[in-house]
Structure formats: structure tokens, C-alpha cells
Image (cartoon, rainbow, N blue to C red):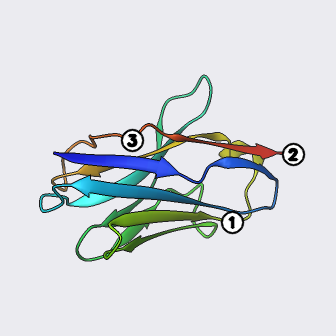
Amino acid sequence: QVQLAESGGGLVQAGGSLRLSCVISGRTSDIYDIGWHRQAPGKEREFVARIRWTAGVTYYADSVKGRFTISRDDAQNTVYLQMNSLIPEDTAVYSCARRATPGGSYGYWGQGTQVTVSG
């Protein structure tokens, strides 16, 4: 089993920055990648960014490309999401999840962390 726990959310003004953390515990040997997703009130959950667990390859949604950076710390079993130049449209609950295969679904969702960007 694997467990994921997010932290780092908060209230920030437009143009500001936040860094989210996703701590992974338990069995990590079958992780293909870790993905960050977000869900705004009244909207579907959407993909934000992902990072391959071993190779470190990253991929971003167009809406955050150039503003957000996903990275990992192997020693700490932690994946970070550095969010810069935040805009009100980034307001959402951000969650991380694990995928075991390239074509698989994300699972083992964390509880999420709220990010609120004031205009």
C-alpha cells in the first residue's frame, strides 16, 4: 500500500507563489509517476502536472506551463509543485495521486490542500 499526503496550500495574492508538497509513504516500488490535479468549486477535477518516479520526466497542462514546476526529492519521498505567477483561476483543491502504469488511472489520492488566489 502507498499513502500520499499533501500540504502547503493557503491564501495568496495574484502574482504570488506557493509550494505544495506531496509526501509518499509505504510501498513506492510500483510507482510509475505522481500527478498533481486540482478541482475548483463546481468544476471537474483537472490534471496539472506529473513526474516520472524514476526517470524524472515531467509533463504539464497548458494552463500552468511556464508558471508551475514539478520536482521530486528521492531521499524524502516527496514531490513538490512550485507555483509562481498565480492567478485567481488557479484557486482549487490540489491533490496528488499515484499511477502504477503509463496508461493506468491515478489512485491513492491524498486528502488535498486548498489554494486560494485573491485578485
Q: Which residue is mark 3?
A: 110
Under mark 3, the amino acid is Gly
Mark 3, residues whose alpha carbon is within 10 Å: few (<14), some, or many (≥20)?
some
Q: Residues within 10 Å of mark 1 (few under 14, many from 20)?
A: some
Q: Amino acid at mark 2?
A: Gly
Vertical relation: 15 (above or below) 99: below
Spatial separation of the CA atoms under disc 3 and disc 1:
22 Å
Name the residue that disc number 1 marks.
Answer: 84
As helix, strand or loop, the secondary structure at mark 3 comes to loop
Is 63 located above or below residue 109 in the figure?
below
Residue shown at 78%/61% (left/top)?
Answer: 16
Q: Residue furthest right?
A: 119
Q: Quadrant of the C terminus?
A: top right
Disc 3 vs disc 1: which is toward the camera?
3
Q: Secondary structure at mark 1?
A: loop
| Side (left or right) of 100 relative to 77 | left
Q: Which residue is disc 2 drawn over?
A: 119
Number of numbered labels in the structure image: 3
Sequence-wise, the earlier of marks 3 and 1 is 1
Identified at 41% across, 64% down, the residue is 79
- Lower position in the chain sequence, tag 2 or tag 1: 1
Q: Secondary structure at mark 2?
A: loop
Task: Find the distance from the CA under tag 3 to the CA under tag 2.
Answer: 28 Å
Question: How many other residues sit within 10 Å of disc 2, few (<14), some (14-19) or many (≥20)?
Answer: few
Find residue 116 and report its horizontal and vertical position in percent.
Answer: 72, 42
Q: Is residue 118 above or below residue 29?
A: above
